[in-house]
Amino acid sequence: MKIKSIRQVKNLAGKIVFLRADLNVGFKKAAIKDDYKIVMILPTIRFLLRHSCRLIIATHLNKGNTAKPLAKRLAELLGRKVLFAGACVGPKVIKALSEARAGDIMLLENLRFDSREKKNDKRFAKELAAPADIYVNDAFAVSHREHASVSAIKRYLPSYAGLLLEKEILNLTRVLKPKLPLISIVGGAKIETKIALLNNLAKKSHRILIGGALANNFIAAHGFKIGRSLADKTSINLASALVKKYKNIILPVDVLVAKKMNSASFQVKPVNQVKADEMILDIGPRTVKLFVSFIRQAKTIIWNGPLGYFENIHFKHGTLSIARLVAARSTGEAYGVAGGGETIEALRQTKMEHYIDWVSTGGGAMLTFLGGEKMPGLKGIVK
């Protein structure tokens, strides 16, 4: 595998660089809740600034948020002014860039304010590319999307990987060629988004440990009652097909159940004793012990998705127990990779996330890459 890295660009000095970042942070009353994604992009920005480049930074944000607060936070972290363009394309951007000097930074408005972004519109991509000399993709988390700033824009500019994207590819590729035994831990809710991942990992993994709402479908596929737990017929059928195909899928043997999701009243039960009015909200202590026995054998560990409703203090024990062990085994006894927003949040709650060899900035993108599916954002950059 070859990566066209920004490190390889000759005569980079003074270039105008269109840098596609993923700064899709959460907000609380217009304040940034977590600047993790902003911090992760800083090495690429600093690398380009050392070469006196002029930077056009572009990102998307969910829920109609403006990118303006990002400019302020970037400026604080970099210790230099970051101009906010107030638009994605057009006269405002052209005028601001014409006045920029070497080492200046301009942040564009939320790309999704323009409906053409998600349509992968070629004209919009051409407008984005027009002021720049080269394109740098450092937004691994959206590289599975066929959007204008990720895919179509590469038609109009020489394209390269940023330092973060390069690290993502190298670390995730290492997992695809693992030191054995490989133990995969997969949780979360939506099985349809993880079918390709499960199929790909099942062929390489010694064991795949299943938790979270994802496990409900597998438990039901074995004929056990799951009460009012999150599941659906289509997902149960998908789980049933996987169980028949692979014999290395390990499911919970006991679970925490309650009658309401936010209840403080719960019971630990074997998986075959869930009542009709109960819902499964976490893996039980025997399951934790079982999963631990496999994780301790691992030389490579992949983890994506929580193992229970860990947002509730009563149902976070399973996820946090596994998080601590994955962190403890990583950077030494095993090579550990984790990804997905909730997975990262669980690791942070343990205060051990820095022990993981690689924490991916992409949730869906990580699933797509490890599942061997198409990554439009990597086409032409990773060969």
Image (cartoon, rainbow, N blue to C red):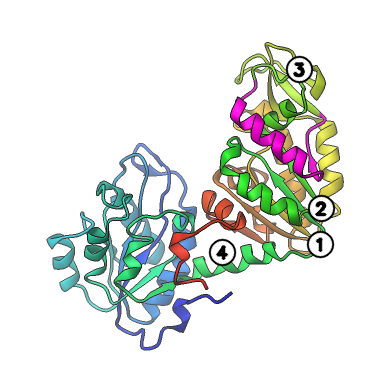
Any magenta on residue 282? no
Provide the residue designation for mark 4.
Answer: 168
Depth order, front residue of 327/214: 214
Task: Identify whether 292 is placed above or below 382.
Answer: above
Give the residues drawn in magenta, as a range. 229-253
| Marks 2,1: beta carbons within 8 A | yes
Provide the residue designation for mark 2.
Answer: 206
Q: Earlier in the sequence, mark 4 or mark 1?
A: 4
Amino acid tagged 2: His
Q: Which of marks 1 and 3 is nearer the N terminus?
A: 1
Q: Quadrant of residue 2?
A: bottom right
Q: Earlier in the sequence, mark 4 or mark 2?
A: 4
Depth order, front residue of 144/46: 144
Q: In which quarter of the image is residue 188?
A: top right
Q: Residue 376 vs residue 363: left or right?
A: left
Crowding at label 4, few (<14), some or many (≥20) Cα neighbours within 10 Å?
A: many
Considering every residue shown, the one lying at the far top of the view is: 277
Rounded to the nearest angstrom, the CA distance separating label 4 from label 3 is 41 Å
Q: Quick one: SS at disc 1?
A: loop
Observer able to see residue 71: yes
Q: Earlier in the sequence, mark 4 or mark 3?
A: 4
Name the front one of labels 2 and 3.
Answer: 2
